[in-house]
Image (tube, coloured by chain):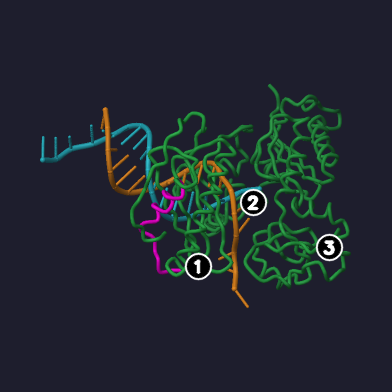
Chain colours: A green, B orange, C cyan
Amino acid sequence: MLQRWIAHLDMDAFYASVELLRHPQLQGQPVVIGGRRALPEGVPPADSPAWPRLRDYAGRGVITTATYPARALGVHSGMGLMKAALLAPDAILLPVDFDRYRHFSRLFKAAVLEIAPVMEDRGIDEIYLDLTDVPGAQASAPDDAHAGVRAVAQRLKQAVREATGLSCSIGVTPNKLLSKLASDMDKPDGLTLFTHAEVPARVWPLPAGRINGIGPKAAERLRELGIETIGQLAAADPAWLAGHFGSRQGQWLHDAAHGRDERPVVTWRDPKSMSRETTFERNLHPRHDREALGALLTRLAEQVAADLARKQLVARTVGVKLRYEDFRIVTRSLTMPQPTADGPTLRRWAARSLRDIDLDRRLRLMGVRVEGLQSADTVPDSPALQVQESLPLF
DNA sequence: TCTGGGGTCCTAGGACCC
DNA sequence: TCTGGGGTCCTAGGACCC
C-alpha cells in the first residue's frame, strides 16, 4: 500500500510577482495591484513620480494583490483602495492585467504537469497535485523517511522557477486539507511537509479560521462557543458540534480538525455556471437610469453568450444579480424551455426574471449569470423564443 | 469617497409527480 | 375526501474560495 502524498502549490503574491518581472526596478517596494487605471506611457524609474501612487487613486475598486513590502504596511487583497491609500499612500498602484497573469498561469501549470500529471486546477495561481504515483515519491533515505517526495517537491519548485522566473510555496501531506494549510506555513518560497502524526503539533495551535471552508461567519460562531483553535475544535464533542452546526457540517468540522480528508485530486470538472458582472462608476437608479441599465444588461448578456459560445456550451437557466447601494444583493433567475447561447434570447429572459424587484433604491452592480450548462452539440438549433410583454424594468 | 469579479456548494420551501 | 412518503425540479439566498 502506497503512502498517499498530496501537494498544494501556491504561487507567491502571484499578480504582483508577475508585475515585478516586467518592472524589476520596483523590487523591494510596496506595490499593490488593483483598480481600473491604465499605466502611464513608458517605464519610469522606481522613484519617479510618474508611477501612480495609491494616494492619487479616486474611485471604486479593491486590492487584488499586494507585494510583501506592501503587506507589511497593513494592506491586503480585498481591501478597498481608498482605505488602503490611508495606510500606504506612497505605495505604487498598478492596474490588473489578467491576460498576462493567465499566460504565466499556463506556463507554470505546464511545467508542473511534466513532473506530476495528476493536477487539480484551483484557480489562476494554485493547484493540487497527487504525487502518490510520481516516480521516486515513495523513496526514503536513512536520515529522511520522506526524502523521495521531498525531492519531487523540490523539483516542482525548480521547474516553476525555470518556466516563469517566479517562486511558489508547496505543502505536502497525506491530503488536500492539510496540504492547503502546509503551503501557507512557510511563505514565500516555502516547502512544508508533514504526516498525519504531526497534526497535533503543527495544526492544532492554528486558529480555526485557517481551515479551508471555515470562513469569517463560521469562525465567529465558533469563537462565540469558546473555540478559537483547531485543537479546541478537535477536542469538541462531535454531537455537540452537530447540535450547533447541523449533522453534516458538524461532522465535517470534527473531521477537518483531526486532519481527516479523503477527497481525491480531481483533474476535470464540468463547468456549472458562468457569469459576467460589473460595478458602476456611480450608482444608477432603476427608473432614472433605465436606458443605461438596459444597455448594460444587453452588454452583459452578450458577454455571457460569447463566453458560452467559446466553450461550446448552452444554458438552460439565466438570471440577473443586482447589488443595491446598501450592498444588499438580490438574484432572480428563470429556466427557459430550451437551452441556448443566443445573446438576445438570454437578454430577454434575464429582463423577464426581474419582474418583482425593488425599483426605488439605487444600484451599484448588475450581473448576468447562466447555469444548467450542457454541451452545445447535444442540443439541436432552435429558433429564438420570443418573449414580449411589458416589464417594470427594461 | 469604504467593500471587484468569477466561481462552487449547500439549504430550504414549494410545485409537481408517482 | 383524506391520508402517506419519496423524488426531482425550480428558485432565492448565503457562505466560502481565489
Please state the chain letter of the residue tagged with numbered disc 2 in the rendered image. Answer: A
Question: Does the magenta segment cover residue A187?
Answer: no
Question: For mark 1, does the 10 Å Cα neighbourhood hold few (<14), some (14 to 19), or many (20 or more) residues?
Answer: some
A51 relative to A11, above or below: below
Q: CA distance from mark 1 to mark 3?
A: 38 Å
Instruction: Find the residue positioned furthest to the top.
Output: A1
Question: Does the magenta segment cover residue A350?
Answer: yes
Closer mark to the observer between disc 1 and disc 3: 1
The residue indicated by pointer 3 is A29
A203 relative to A129, above or below: below
Choose the circle earlier in sequence order: 1 or 3: 3
Mark 2 lies on a secondary structure that is: helix
Compared across the picture, whether A248 is left or right of A215 comes to left
The residue indicated by pointer 2 is A210
Choose the circle earlier in sequence order: 2 or 3: 3
Please state the chain letter of the residue tagged with numbered disc 1 in the rendered image. Answer: A
Compared across the picture, whether A198 is left or right of A331 comes to right
Closer mark to the observer between disc 2 and disc 3: 3
Marks 2 & 1 on one chain: yes
Q: Position of residue A186 (x, y in %)?
A: 78, 49
Please state the chain letter of the residue tagged with numbered disc 3 in the rendered image. Answer: A
Q: Position of residue A164 (x, y in %)?
A: 82, 43
Disc 3 residue type?
A: Gln
Quadrant of the frame with the C terminus of chain A: bottom left
Specify the quadrant of the image occupied by residue A266. Answer: top right
Q: CA distance from mark 2 to mark 1?
A: 38 Å
Magenta-colored span: A346-362
Disc 2 residue type?
A: Arg
The residue indicated by pointer 1 is A284
Disc 1 residue type?
A: Leu
Q: CA distance from mark 2 to mark 3?
A: 28 Å
